[in-house]
Amino acid sequence: MILKINNQSLEVDVDPATPLLWVIREQAGLTGTKFGCGIGQCGACTVQLDGVAIRSCLTPIQAVADKEITTIEGIASETELHTIQRIWIQEQVPQCGYCQSGQIISAHALLTKTTSPTDEEIDQAMSGNICRCGTYSRIKKGIKLAAEELAEASTINLENNG
Amino acid sequence: MGKWTRRAFITTGVLTGGALVVGIVIRPGNRAGKVKDLIAGEGDTVLNIWLKVNADNTITVIVPHAEMGQGVHTTLPMMLADEMDADWKTITMLEAPGHKEYANYAMGKGFLMGPKDIPSMLIGTVDGFFLTATKQISLQMTGGSASVRFTGMLAMRVAGAAARAVLLEAASQEWEVATEDLVVKNSTISHPPTNRREPFASFVVKAASLSQPAKPRLKTTEEFMIMGTSPPRFDIPSKVDGTANFGIDVTLPNMKYAAIKASPVFGARAKPLDASAIKDMPGVHKIVNLEGAVAVIADGYWLAKKAINELPIEFDKSDHDTVGMNDIYDQYLRDMDVAVAEGKEEKDVKKGSINKIFKEATNIIEAEYRVPYLAHATMEPMNCTALVKEDSCEIWAGSQNPLGFATSVAEVLELDQEKVLVHNQYLGGGFGRRVVPDVAIQAAMIAKEVDYPVKLIWSREDDIRQDHYREANISRFKASLTDKGQISGWNNQFVFKHDPEEAPHIPYGVENQFIHYTNSKTHVPWGYWRSVDSSMHAFFTESFMDELAFKANKDPYQFRREHLTNAPRYLKVLDLAAGKANWGEDLPAGWGRGISLHESFGTIVAQVAEIEIIENDLKVHRVVCVADPGFAFHPDGFSAQMESGIVFGLTAALYGEITIENGAVKQSNFHDYQMLRINENPKIETYIVTSDNWPGGAGEPSTPGIAPAVANAIFNASGIRIRELPFKNHELKANAKILG
């Protein structure tokens, strides 16, 4: 079976019922996506499937064959970090850092869909991601700052193109 | 105890390529008595802090503590760099390997002596008693909020100052000028009168040939350049792009994976499984029978997990198969009663005459509080990778206690400890859980059966059910109030006592006190849990203080103030918290405010919680947190730790409950051991008070005070006094009238 992860094709030979999480970690060697609970409760394993945030610990690989899978390793460009990642450093968001791949992937999916999210929209999009270190207030601030920067960047792009 | 000669050395040397190595080495001068097992031979090292001045004038610092999000990999190098007047931009750090030479002497000493007895300069104060104690609490441990206040203060700063002194002396000799005329800044030494200026690296050879000053001068707070600022943490960039290596991320050639099933009832034995049980499971290689568990090794974790779920694993009956929470609480109460009846209480604090005062008192208040067991639930489930060879073993794990892991693994494999090497990784949460070496012992026992490395991963269910728990406890109070509303007597009995010693002590001026405890052993394993005993005693004592205030007809804040007339440090923190939280100002109907004050790990914290009760639902809107840690070396990191500790404590107060049923833990995962999520996160405001006191901890001190602050706020909003955690088990209803 062939999976498309971060724009690269990966041929895997495992039980099609295997959760995507373990294929990403063990076959693709992308360990940024984390195991947290195995029942879709904590969000540590969040990846994007065609741009939508999903829990890879519950998703069998047979369900994702034709889809674009994006992990934390796949959101930066070759030369620079994604705005969300940069803001995460600027605001010193992570503590232990274990949940942060999932947090960033969820935030990325939110900001792709909702360019200027309200507090309630952030709560709704991010409440599936547990952080045991309690970095929630910095995550919220980070999302708002990233939204502002992304909006500015897209305005500049529009002006340049227009 | 034998008499100790006191020796410490600053050693220097030049490495190939021209780097200067400076080591602060503390060696015992006497190897008699209790410490002889610890000290192998002449010149054996107790504590090393190493730094390296490289040929390109960059500096490498070795840090003997694990990074678990508390920022210690940044803050400790800051302390060293500042004393050295080094250029912060050129500092890199390495974590010390799990080895005796990095033993955490400073932590052991700090715990035992208490800050007030520690001289401003450590060098030359080794004695055997502390070495023994250090060994007992496991060397090189990261916990007890100790990294900055002990290792930082007693070792990193001294090492930095010593390195600076050595380099200064070298420059003085090379240039033939007085050291007083030299200026050190940003890793450069200059001599303004002759306009000379050279980087540290120019003096490496000379510095290595010098005999060293025994007592380098440390900076005063006013002289700090880096300490007290908040540079970005070293570990964060790798935590935003997926490259940070946690224990679970370790990948080795030919590595296979293991899953495990342990006895749900602690201590019960597993019935061994025959090797043929996996013959129809492709990709599954081996069954390993351990004493209380069965493990399988497979090509991938999912395969291993599936196999372990399908195998018919059984456990022997044990004496604890019927034990439930009621049995445990009944046993506690029985043991507490017997202790009192027979006068066999373990005394903690005794002053004045509690019996006399209670006999005379007219206003006596009694209350009984309870808290349940708690699991740690670190985001990264327990895991460990091991490679066992005939006469050596390598371990990869995120550990708060790498040397303890090495010792335990060496013991079960019957190897010398030197033959076990621990490669410590980032910790996906610690909170005290990653002090316990259980998973490393299992991984080693499993890997011993094969000739390739094995990564053992616990499921979340294993993690919740095989933890070492913050204990369930009962705390009973009896207090007397004078006609003027002063507390005249304070009697408090609870079960067990661990750390920190001051956890059940109150800062309030009460003349007659009897604080005592009773041991009541159960089969449930105990472990350090963020803030340890303070995680429950702050809830007990600060809730009961609120009850007394109500009985005395006084405002809870003012009532505390009146009992702090001889405790100005506490008073300052409490006053600032009340002020910042608009204490006394009106709140909407259904809202309430509650206050708490508690010191742990050397830091005093006051919290005011603002809550709302909406239809039996509790919403914590705002928390004002004021902390006096003496000095915050990385203020942004300190604030982050305060926020973190509050969310951790609030999670436990709202939801945390591990229940024992039929001898085993009932909960299993995040659906029934619930965590606070972003939509429930209160607005947290942290204010730092600086005082002249010895630095206090950051990782733990904000956890204890949130439960009582919220419980007191609930009382303020509803008149309902909650004496048992968690809050989720209580029906709440706002009642604005109760307090008038």
Image (spheres, coloured by chain):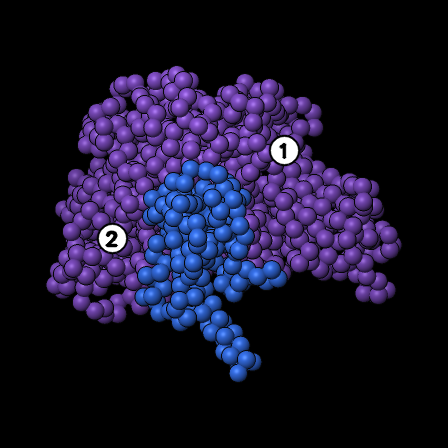
Chain colours: A blue, B purple
Q: Which chain is mark 1 on? A: B
Q: Residue furthest left?
A: B737
The percent coordinates of residue A109 (x first, y second) are: 42, 61
Task: Name the residue tied to disc 2.
Answer: B711
Give the amino acid type for the residue marked by disc 2 in the picture: Ala
Q: Nearer the viewer, residue B261 or B618?
A: B261
> What residue did someone put label 1 on?
B101
In percent of width and height, residue A154 lies at 50, 75
Subunit that carries the residue with mark 2:
B
Q: Secondary structure at mark 1?
A: helix
Dividing the picture into quadrants, the one containing residue B63 is top right
Task: Tell me, yes or no, whether the two marked residues, 2 and 1, touch with CB atoms within 8 Å.
Answer: no
Of residues B282 and B570, the one nearer the viewer is B282
Badge number at residue B729: none
Horizontal side, residue A65 vs residue B614: left or right: right
Would residue B59 be seen by someone viewing this image from the given angle?
yes
